[in-house]
Image (cartoon, rainbow, N blue to C red):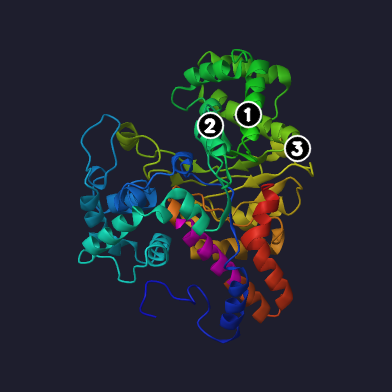
Amino acid sequence: MAGLTDPDLLFAGEGRPLSLARDLYAGIKDLPIVSPHGHTDPRWYALNEAFPDPAQLLVVPDHYIFRMLFSQGVRLEDLGVSSLDGSPAEADGRAIWRRFAEHYYLFRGTPTRLWLDHVLAHLFGIEEPLNAATADRHYDTIATLLQWENFRPRALFERFNIEVIATTDGALDDLGWHKAIRDSGWEGRVVPTYRPDAVIDPDFEGFSANLDRLGKISGCDTGSWTGYLDAHRQRRAFFKGFGATASDHGHPTAETANLSDAAAQELFNRIRRGSDDERERKLFRAQMLTEMAKMSRDDGLVMQIHPGSWRNHSPSMFQKFGRDKGFDIPTRTDYVTALKPMLDCVGLERDLTIVLFTLDETSYARELAPLAGVYPALRLGPAWWFHDSPEGMRRFREMTTETAGFYNTVGFNDDTRAFPSIPARHDVARRVDCAYLARLVAEHRLREDEAHELAKELAYMLAKKAYRL
């Protein structure tokens, strides 16, 4: 096929595995998309305005793109990424797009290339490869289409066949855009997710002021331990009122603690006074993961733990550009020892769901699959972030299925800010899973009827069940 995508993308090259994969994929490719964890902006759906231009839609907000270009010497300012001090950054969308197109070859072999080729071909009808020579033609095509009503956020939501999408929202967010969506009468389902890092992590910038604000908006005394916990309960209930079914926790490690009430109160008092003891700050984060798990046991919010990223690895880039600029780097992560205090407290709860993610693939078979394969409260999130790729997804299935099975996983989530890539990401995951299931059938490890049932579970049902959507 001469186009940008092939109907047998990611399937075996020939024989029965190819035929089986095709059949499995045909049965699930058009299922609705359930997107239980992501970072799209709720204001898009609230305002339903046209996206500004191809660069602002596809390049400027996507750290997968600009981190690769930065690694090859392209300045972030030249890609339209603004610095915190307001220094000039490229504002001409066409200039940004040309620079991106000139360097598109850098993405050969990467999942970003798969997603972008899918977007160009299936969303914008472009079949000619992107490069310096085609940059302006493709820019003009996309820019024209973005002015059409059927390329606005709500129309794309419906075109992508999204059944529900969850955004990620800070604990201090007033959820004004979610209220606007609800009040608009539009039937698209967009729900928030409770992300309390800014009021749980003492190393988060402005932590003390954040606690003050948490107290103000919740009406609780965040100067005391009990009042602080009540403030979280109040905010979680507020989020649930807008349809939230999950919380999300991006801690540096998976470390948990289970202190006595008296010890936890004393620790909070020291943290609230501004303790600069690194051990106390780590212990507080650890205790708060357990507190959040206990609250999830009580209020039903699914708890997601995303540990193991060294956030903002370059201090100079963080100081200049702020968070989420491509400098979050994976670290080695312990789960068996780290999670034990929390699991001792709530791990046997059958009605609690804690979804574990990792950036440390060495933990799949050694730690995560055995844990999820026995503790009723635990489920495994899909291959995440740097491993959200065909090879990463294959490794995840190969290293976790033997011990945890399929039903202790939660299907796929796209975890993206790049709205147009959502169908592409789900399509890649569905293709990889169909290829894996086809292999099991071809090796006589799975019946064909079981493979068809599992294909639907992995593409659609497991996410709905796990996230209570």
CB-based contact (under 8 Å), mark 3 and mark 1 = no
Instruction: Residue type at mark 2: give it.
Output: Leu
Q: Secondary structure at mark 3?
A: helix
> Disc 1 designates what residue?
238
Q: Secondary structure at mark 1?
A: helix
Instruction: Residue type at mark 1: give it.
Output: Phe
Q: Secondary structure at mark 2?
A: loop
At 47% across and 45% down in the image, what residue appears?
A: 40
Dominant secondary structure (helix, strand or loop) of the stretch shown in magenta:
helix
- Please tell me whether mark 3 or mark 1 is closer to you in this view: 1
Q: Is residue 257 visible?
A: no
Q: Residue 49 bears which disc, if any?
A: none
Instruction: Residue type at mark 3: give it.
Output: Val
> Disc 3 designates what residue?
346
Quadrant of the drawing holding the N terminus: bottom left
Rendered view: 334 above or below 176:
below
**What span is colored magenta in the figure?**
421-434
Does the stretch in magenta take in 430?
yes
- Mark 1 or mark 3, which is nearer the start of the sequence? 1
CB-based contact (under 8 Å), mark 1 and mark 2 = yes
Residue 19 position in % (x across, y down): 59, 83
**Image quadrant of residue 445?**
bottom right
Give the distance between the C-alpha atoms of the residues marked 3 and 2, in whole angstroms.
30 Å
Give the distance between the C-alpha atoms of the residues marked 1 and 2, in whole angstroms.
9 Å
> Disc 2 designates what residue?
175
Q: Quick one: 143 or 196, which is closer to the camera?
A: 143
Q: Is residue 49 visible?
A: yes
Residue 62 position in % (x across, y down): 38, 49
Residue 111 position in % (x across, y down): 43, 62
Does the stretch in magenta take in 180?
no
Residue 44 position in % (x across, y down): 44, 43
